């Protein structure tokens, strides 16, 4: 869960990492969709490793294998 320390100063943060298994969140969009600037901005904020350049390459992938090859060496951030 995300908090803003300035706004949420009355909240207490507790480590609950032992309560939940690690999981991967995926972002998907329909092939051929035009990604508007605000959507690219959201994706970059959500997943900084997904730059506009990487998104452009992902859009050019023709199948799952090409997509997996594109992201094979990407280290996913852990939060």
Image (cartoon, rainbow, N blue to C red):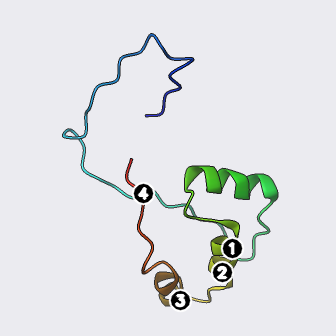
Which residue is drawn at the image coordinates 45% and 73% (left, top)?
A: 74
Disc 2 to disc 3: CB gap under 8 Å: no
Q: Disc 4 to disc 3, how far (Cα)?
A: 22 Å
Disc 4 to disc 3: CB gap under 8 Å: no
Instruction: Report whether 66 appears left or right of 12.
Output: right
Q: Disc 1 to disc 4, how far (Cα)?
A: 18 Å
Q: Secondary structure at mark 3?
A: helix
Q: Earlier in the sequence, mark 1 or mark 3?
A: 1
Up the image or down, 13 lies above or below 70; here it is above
Closer to the observer: label 4 or label 2? 4
Instruction: Report whether 59 appears left or right of 69.
Output: right
Instruction: Report whether 44 appears left or right of 20.
Output: right
Up the image or down, 34 lies above or below 9; here it is below
Q: Earlier in the sequence, mark 4 or mark 3?
A: 3
Q: What residue sits right under mark 2 in the picture?
A: 57
Residue 11 figure quarter: top left
Which residue is drawn at the image coordinates 62% and 86% (left, top)?
A: 61
Q: What residue sits right under mark 3 in the picture?
A: 66
Q: Secondary structure at mark 1?
A: helix
x%, y% of residue 30?
Answer: 67, 70
Neighbours of disc 4 within 10 Å: few (<14), some (14-19), many (20+): few
Q: What residue sits right under mark 4 in the picture?
A: 77
Q: What residue sits right under mark 1 in the picture?
A: 53
Which residue is drawn at the image coordinates 80% and 57% (left, top)?
A: 37
x%, y% of residue 66?
Answer: 53, 89
x%, y% of residue 79?
Answer: 39, 47
Up the image or down, 35 lies above or below 7; here it is below
Q: Disc 2 to disc 3, how far (Cα)?
A: 10 Å
């Amino acid at each position: 869960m995300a908090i803003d320390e300035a706004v949420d100063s009355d909240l207490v943060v507790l480590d609950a990492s032992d309560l939940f298994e690690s999981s991967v969140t995926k972002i998907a969009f329909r092939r051929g969709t035009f990604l508007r600037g605000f959507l690219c901005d959201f994706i970059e904020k959500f997943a900084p490793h997904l730059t506009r350049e990487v998104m452009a390459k992902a859009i050019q992938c023709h199948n799952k294998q090409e997509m997996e090859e594109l992201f094979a060496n990407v280290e996913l951030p852990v939060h």
